[in-house]
């Protein structure tokens, strides 16, 4: 079964500093990978996703993530944090069709990002 | 504007009561999902539907029921058999059934037990 590990349930950075949110997955084959953001009492919004092709994926709001097969990782980064980035971030995976995954997503437990002045 | 609507925003349930959460989408998406979110646990899949009149259990379906009579609607009923229903419930939809598909989320319903 798929699993997703997000290291650090809470991450705090200063405004203007690098944001790094970690995501590792377990899968027998490279899965499809997603990062979502959730603001308080709201639904989730897609930041970016990796399916095939280029392993460095650029998303909205200046975020990007790199798929590293050898490390089974898909860490999310942003060069310079802004106060508006304060939110909860979820990493999710789905199995490719040949693994019978259909369109079921498995989510990590989330990382709460705090941005300080 | 296209999107997913969930109602109500807050819902209170009494002991032994069934309650129904509404989810409507006007995106013409085939697939719809229900997730439960608890603090520190991420999202867990309750039910999903890939096509009208068909749905499958997710990881935590016990105590819940769904229907999919129309493409745009996927209501979730929390039955009295669900002993710990307090949570944030999120509905989502995707254009198709493929594993690459992006799931689009509604604003959520918070269920509280009186």
Image (cartoon, rainbow, N blue to C red):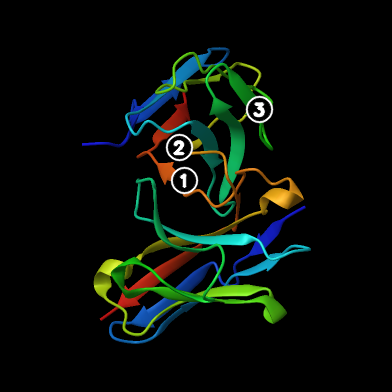
**Chain label for disc 1:** B
Identity of the residue drawn at 67% across and 34% down: B60
Instruction: Give coordinates of residue A107: x percent, y percent.
Output: 59, 54
| Residue at image coords 45%, 30% | B111
What secondary structure is found at the residue carrying circle 3?
strand
State the quadrant of the C terminus of chain A.
Answer: bottom left
Q: CA distance from mark 1 to mark 2?
A: 5 Å
Which callout, 1 or 3, points at the residue further toward the start of the chain?
Answer: 3
Would residue B16 appear left or right of A35 to someone viewing this image?
right
Mark 1 touching mark 3, by CB under 8 A?
A: no
Whichever of labels 3 and 2 marks the residue nearer the N terminus, that label is 3
Q: Is residue A80 left or right of residue A113?
A: left
Which residue is at the far left? Answer: B1
For residue B65, say whether it is visible: no
- Eyeballing the image, is B1 above or below A107? above
Q: Residue at x 79, y 63 (%)?
A: A28
- Front residue of this view, candidates A56 and A36: A56
Marks 1 & 3 on one chain: yes
Crowding at dot 1, Cα within 10 Å, few <14 / some 14-19 / many 20+, comes out as many
What chain does mark 2 sit on? B
Tell me the subunit letter for badge 3.
B
Image position of B103 (left or right of A78): right
Q: Are marks 1 and 2 in contact (CB under 8 Å)?
A: yes
Determine the secondary structure under disc 2.
strand
The residue indicated by pointer 3 is B56
Residue B93 numbered tag: 2
Total count of labels = 3
Give how far across and how far down residue A56 sits, in percent.
49, 78
Vertical placement of residue B72 versus B90, above or below:
above
């Amino acid at each position: 079964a798929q699993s997703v590990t997000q290291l650090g349930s809470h991450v705090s950075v200063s405004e203007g500093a690098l944001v790094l949110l970690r995501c590792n997955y377990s899968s027998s084959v490279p899965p499809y990978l997603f990062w979502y953001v959730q603001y308080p009492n709201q639904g989730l919004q897609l930041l970016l996703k990796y399916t095939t092709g280029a392993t460095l994926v650029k998303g909205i709001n200046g975020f990007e993530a790199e798929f590293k097969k050898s490390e089974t990782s898909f860490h999310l980064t942003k060069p310079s944090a802004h106060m508006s980035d304060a939110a909860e971030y979820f990493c999710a995976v789905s199995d490719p069709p040949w693994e019978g995954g259909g369109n079921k997503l498995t989510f990590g437990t989330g990382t709460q990002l705090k941005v300080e002045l | 504007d296209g999107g997913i609507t969930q109602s109500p925003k807050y819902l209170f349930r009494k002991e032994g009561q069934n309650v129904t959460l509404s989810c409507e989408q006007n995106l013409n998406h085939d697939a719809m999902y229900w997730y439960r979110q608890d603090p520190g646990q991420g999202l867990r899949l309750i039910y999903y539907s890939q096509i009208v009149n068909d749905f499958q259990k997710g990881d935590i379906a016990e105590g819940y029921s769904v229907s999919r009579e129309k493409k745009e609607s996927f209501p979730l009923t929390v039955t009295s058999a669900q002993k710990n229903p307090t949570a944030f419930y999120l509905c989502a939809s995707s254009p198709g059934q493929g594993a690459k598909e992006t799931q689009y989320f509604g604003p959520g319903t918070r269920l509280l037990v009186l």
